[in-house]
Amino acid sequence: MTQSFWLFGSRLNIVADHTTTGGQYDLIEGYFPPGTQTPPHRHTRYSEQLYVLSGEFTVWAGENKVVLSAGESFLISPGTPHVVATLSDKPARGLVVAAPSAFARLIAAVGTLDAAETSDMALFERISAEIGDEMLGLPGTLPADVITATA
């Protein structure tokens, strides 16, 4: 059964998680309104594969900056500092496969049912640490500045 949550301005639907994949991976479908951006972060224990269904994503990963359109994908290896943003004036939709499973746990624990609600940041930080995620800055931080400073 799909579960839907809001996190950092994006609507995230958990399509599959550890309960249905035996912990192998999470499958997340996301809707990202124009101007949304993840905080700079890195996953130390799992990879993140982003596949674009519609719209356009800009991804800063390590020293790379790529702009992805519908039908394109990008793999973010564990340990790579990254930011994913929707910079155009149109929304974007994508699929994320996180392997092994961990990301869905964070979304389910911290995501909100209403877009207007604010996530519990203390809980976000605790769950992030438990699954091996490291926040490298606040949402809106210039990705190149953070990635260069942490490289």
Image (cartoon, helix red, strand yellow):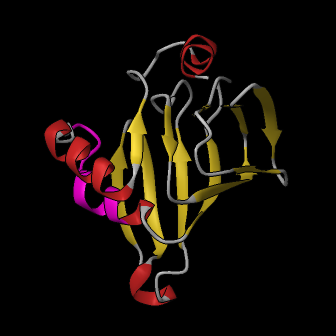
Identify the residue shown where x is 43% and y is 60%. 103
Q: Which residues are magenta?
A: 105-116
Q: Residue at x 75, y 25 (%)?
A: 63
Q: Is residue 113 visible?
A: no
> Quarter holding the C terminus?
top right
Numbered marks: total: 0
- Residue 115: image quadrant is top left
Q: Is residue 113 magenta?
A: yes
Residue 70 in the image: x percent, y percent?
81, 49
Extreme residue in the front direction? 151
Q: Is residue 146 above or below residue 95?
A: above
Q: Is residue 150 visible?
A: yes
Residue at the spot 39% in from the left edge and 52% down from the top edge: 132
In terms of image quadrants, where is residue 32?
top right
Please give left or right for residue 68 compared with residue 6 in the image. right
Give the residue at x 80% y 31%.
66
Q: Nearer the viewer, residue 81 or 115?
A: 81
Image quadrant in which you'd find residue 69: top right
In the rendering, at what x and y percent does residue 45 appear? 50, 58
* Viewport quadrant of the N terminus: bottom left
Q: Is residue 99 left or right of residue 71?
A: left
Relative to residue 92, is residue 52 depicted above or below? Answer: below
Residue 98 drawn in magenta: no
In this picture, residue 122 sits left or right of residue 83: left
x and y, in percent, of residue 143 in the image = 59, 19
